[in-house]
Image (cartoon, grey):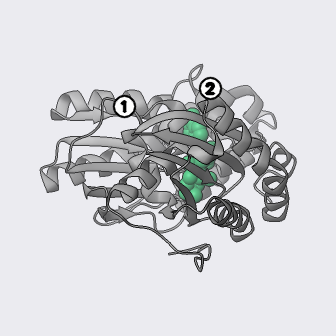
Amino acid sequence: TTILAIESSCDDTSASVLMDGKILSNCVASQDAHRLYGGVVPEVASRAHQINIIPVVDLAIRQAGIKKTDLDAVAFTRGPGLMGSLIVGVAFAKSLALSLDIPLIEVNHMDAHVLAHFAEDPKPRFPFLCLTVSGGHTQIVKVDAPDQMEVLGQTLDDAAGEAFDKTGKLLGLEYPAGPIIDKLAQQGKPVYDFPEPRIPDLDFSFSGLKTSILYFLKEQIKEDPDFIQHHLNDICASVQDRIVSILLKRLRKAARRTGIKEIAIAGGVSANSALRSGLAEMGQKEGWQTCIPKFEYCTDNAAMIAVAGYFKYQAGQFTDQSVQPAARF
Ligand code: ATP
Ligand code: FE
């Protein structure tokens, strides 16, 4: 079975070819234009997808060493995401499937972030808990099977990735700030203590943290106008430390409550080095089997759409040509 997958939910255009469960190619065209604006501009993203989609799909097919006519199905991200971005990928997937006369498979982007773990060994065993931390979502998901997922807790406001990016904006860093904060934090110490939100149960909140950072910076700048420049590494280390501790404490609570010891992380923020090392450390203490995907499968990519699509292919779950993109589910 050979599947072509297309991902275009946000600002990355990606295509991947999977053959019998194995990823043969995973090509991503990233859009640099948004750096200028400090965030993703939907209209700009949509236009860039239109420019990128054919070259990226072409490259994925060539890198896989196959021909278009070898394809058995086309999988695509139906949502959630930016409508203008989704439209491009969905329209392209539908047209290609129609012209090759092969079936279509719709994939939920958040399910795909979780199922990215099955792109390579070692794979988590069911049931497992997955902390999905990305630019738009923060969720703890109980995964009983590829098509049986239950959200146990999620953010009530900002996502973890947004917390990184918005803090970065306050600090004058480029978008996306997550990887930059990660890097700067490695040269700093978490000497500033930011408050932990009081949110019941397994939910998250990050907007209060952002506000407290804003007020903290304002106060400090009164004393030292160059406070940020003088202490940037320590500020980054402190912010990152707090975000990671919020995430890991909730994850531990969920693990203890469900008794599940198979623990995974997914989404762009799972690329964060402090989260990775913190998870490994907590996992040792708690007796967890932890699973962290390779970096290229953490941020948006079509390989995860291919993997999720392959599960659906095997289950005979196809979509017809009437399918429309869905910004929200
Ligand atoms: P969603 O999947 O919710 O629709 P998205 O697809 O835009 O959102 P991803 O591509 O999964 O999100 O992740 C992007 C986010 O990951 C950004 O907020 C970025 O700052 C963050 N990120 C990437 N690398 C790191 C890192 N090393 N440390 C912290 N954050 C990071
Ligand atoms: Fe994503």
Q: Which quarter of the figure is the N terminus placed in?
A: top left
Judge the density around disc 2: few (<14), some (14-19), many (≥20) Cα neighbours within 10 Å: some
Question: Residue 311 in the image: x percent, y percent?
Answer: 36, 53
Question: Residue 211 in the image: x percent, y percent?
Answer: 61, 58
For the residue marked with disc 2, what is the amino acid?
Answer: Lys
Which numbered disc covers residue 1? none
Question: Residue 110 in the image: x percent, y percent?
Answer: 47, 58
* Rendered residue at 67%/56% (across/down): 10
Residue 62 or residue 126, whichever sits in front: 62
On screen, residue 103 above or below 120: below
Quadrant hosting residue 309: bottom left
On screen, residue 81 above or below 33: below
* Rendered residue at 47%/30% (across/down): 294
Residue 32 or residue 86, whichever sits in front: 86
Question: Residue 61 in the image: x percent, y percent?
Answer: 65, 38
> Of all residues shown, which one is farthest toward the bottom?
322
Q: Secondary structure at mark 2?
A: helix
CB within 8 Å, label 1 to label 2 = no
Q: CA distance from mark 1 to mark 2?
A: 16 Å
Horizontal relation, residue 293 to residue 261: left or right: right
Which numbered disc covers residue 278? 1
For the residue marked with disc 1, what is the amino acid?
Answer: Gly
- On whether ligand 1 comes within 8 Å of the CB at mark 2, the answer is yes
* Rendered residue at 44%/68% (across/down): 318
- On whether ligand 1 comes within 8 Å of the CB at mark 1, the answer is no
* Residue wearing tag 2: 183
On screen, residue 248 above or below 181: below
